[in-house]
Amino acid sequence: MSDIADRIAASFARQGLMRTLGARLVHVAAGEVRIEAAVRPETAQQHGAGHAGLTFAIADSAAGYAALTTLDPGLEVVTSEFRISLLAPATGRLVATGRVVRSGCRIIAVAADVHGDDGAHVATALGTMVPVKVS
């Protein structure tokens, strides 16, 4: 695994929310990260579909880690703004693919798409990440 992939895997392992959601980091490449999570009773809403919070969380993390692939060691990212459009019920295993739209010194524009294992396009999102120094 590359240095950046190792760095992202170590950071992902420290995320309590991702662990709680049962999410897994499944792909890291320059400017692109995929995270997957199964819809479980604990992450479903009252109708049985995945809760919007699950979809949002994995999309945000995938996009944030995609942004991190563009940065040098000693920097991390925080979400400044993130908006999501929910397009279809989230069922089964969800895969969030985050990607960098444009990387700058002060902000990094990102996007993410979430698909179900049945091929449904569950959500699309756009956001802004801000690089911060690791303390």
Image (cartoon, rainbow, N blue to C red):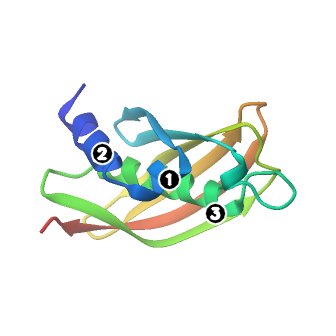
Find out whether the residues at labels 2 and 3 contact each other: C-beta distance under 8 Å: no
Q: Is residue 1 above or below residue 123?
A: above
Q: Tag 3's secondary structure? A: helix
Q: Residue at x 26, y 43 (%)?
A: 10
In this view, the mark in front (1 or 3): 1
In this view, the mark in front (2 or 3): 3
Residue 1 place in picture, x, y as percent:
25, 25
In the displayed orientation, state which residue is furthest to the front. Answer: 42
Q: Which residue is mark 3?
A: 53
Residue 88 place in picture, x, y as percent:
82, 50
Q: Tag 2's secondary structure? A: loop
Q: Residue at x 38, y 42 (%)?
A: 31
Q: Which residue is mark 2?
A: 69
Q: Which residue is mark 1?
A: 20
Residue 118 place in picture, x, y as percent:
78, 30
Sequence-wise, which precedes: disc 2 or disc 1? Answer: 1
Front one among 128 and 4: 4
Q: Residue at x 31, y 63 (%)?
A: 77
Q: Is residue 118 left or right of residue 70?
A: right
Q: Is residue 82 left or right of residue 26?
A: right
Sequence-wise, which precedes: disc 1 or disc 3? Answer: 1
Q: Amino acid at mark 2?
A: Thr
The local crowd at label 1, few if under 14, some if 14 to 19, many if 20 or more residues have their Cα within 10 Å, is: few
Q: Amino acid at mark 3?
A: Gly
Residue 96: image quadrant is: top right
In this view, the mark in front (2 or 1): 1
Sequence-wise, which precedes: disc 2 or disc 3? Answer: 3
